[in-house]
Amino acid sequence: MGQEQDKFLAYLRELGTTLAEYVSTNFGDWSIKGFVDVDQNVYTIFSDTKIISKILDIQIFPKLREFAESIGYGIVLAENRNWYPGLICQEIRSLD
């Protein structure tokens, strides 16, 4: 791995240690418990991976974008929803 990749990976690992606080309470419970419709009906979240991954996307994406910008990268989203990976970090300037 090159020096720039090593720096990026180190920054990413540091970010990874902070992500739990954006999706869970201090007690380790999910911060989002379900959905509420316009009639105030509450629907709990089951272990459906599509729903959970979308919620994580919504909660974590702003932090990923902030992270990328702070180290000179930008977030590039996939052209289609079903393409993998869903996003990539693209270098805007060299890492310091």
Image (cartoon, rainbow, N blue to C red):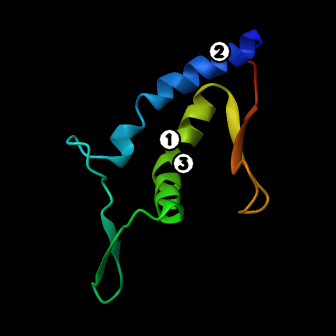
76 above or below 41?
above
Q: Position of residue 32 (x, y in %)?
A: 33, 59
| Residue neighbourhood size for the residue with mark 2, other residues' Cα within 10 Å, grouped as few (<14), some (14–19), many (≥20) | some
Residue under label 2: 7
| Residue neighbourhood size for the residue with mark 3, other residues' Cα within 10 Å, grouped as few (<14), some (14–19), many (≥20) | some
36 above or below 17?
below
Q: Nearer the viewer, residue 65 or 88?
A: 88
Q: Secondary structure at mark 2?
A: helix
Identity, as a three-letter code, of the amino acid under mark 2: Lys
| Residue neighbourhood size for the residue with mark 1, other residues' Cα within 10 Å, grouped as few (<14), some (14–19), many (≥20) | some
Residue under label 1: 63
Q: Is residue 1 something that shows in the picture?
A: yes
Q: Spot the residue most to the top.
A: 3
Residue under label 3: 61
Q: Secondary structure at mark 1?
A: helix
Distance from disc 2 to disc 1, alpha carbons, whole Å, reads: 18 Å
Residue in view at x 40 percent, y 31 percent: 18
